[in-house]
Image (cartoon, rainbow, N blue to C red):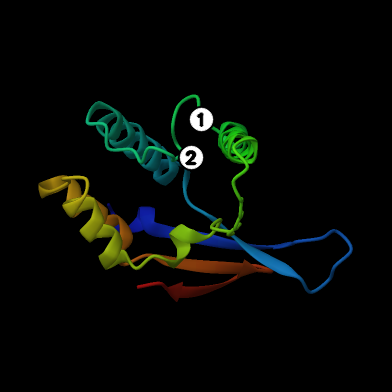
Amino acid sequence: MPEPLKIAMLDPLLKKVNADSNLRPVSNLKFLSKLVERAVFVQLNEYLVENELHEVFQSAYKSFHSTETSLLRVQNDILQSLDKKQSVILVLLDLSAAFDTIGHKILLSRLAERLGISGNVLAWFKSYLSSRSQFVNINGTSLYCPCG
């Protein structure tokens, strides 16, 4: 992935309209970067579907699966267990930022070992994840921050 396409502009946005100090950073990439990401997503997803490599109970990034289908599955499982007079315990975890917390070495290892991705494709993912940078532009002044 070319270095200029790995530069993100951070835009601090307020989480709540009336809050003046509760900001969340929103990272914006160039249009061409987003286009490349979309092309890679489509190809990788086709590979996962063709080779039946998606997790069975995964709802995200799968056609005809959504939060609604996931919730219906959970509800159905709970109701079936209750009908059988079984105990039910539900543990909810917020994994919304899971991608942000996984180590790149672990991610690359799983792409290779579990999904069989290798060669130029794995090298592209390594390039995509490395040497990223970001900047914040405040009143015409840019502050750059290398990310790795």
Q: Give residue 111's mark.
A: none
Residue 133 sits in which quadrant?
Answer: bottom left
Q: Is residue 113 left or right of residue 26?
A: left
* x then y, percent, for residue 21: 79, 74
How many labels sit on residues?
2
* x then y, percent, for residue 98: 48, 60
Judging by the rendered image, the residue that carries numbered circle 1 is 65
135 vs 26: above or below: below
* x then y, percent, for residue 92: 61, 57
Element type where label 1 sits in the image? loop
Which of the marked residues, 1 or 2, is nearer the chain's N terminus? 2
Judging by the rendered image, the residue that carries numbered circle 2 is 60
Which amino acid lies under the numbered mark 1 shown in the image of this protein?
A: His
Find the distance from the CA under tag 1 to the CA under tag 2.
Answer: 7 Å
Q: Dot 2 surroundings within 10 Å: few (below 14), some, or many (20 or more)?
A: few
Q: Residue furthest right?
A: 18
Element type where label 2 sits in the image? loop
Identify which residue is drawn at 85% across, 58% down: 17
| Closest to the observer, 79 or 96 | 79
Identify which residue is drawn at 13% across, 48% down: 118
Look at the numbered discs 1 and 2 and tell me whether their residues touch, using CB distance below 8 Å.
yes
* x then y, percent, for residue 141: 60, 72
Which amino acid lies under the numbered mark 2 shown in the image of this protein?
A: Ala
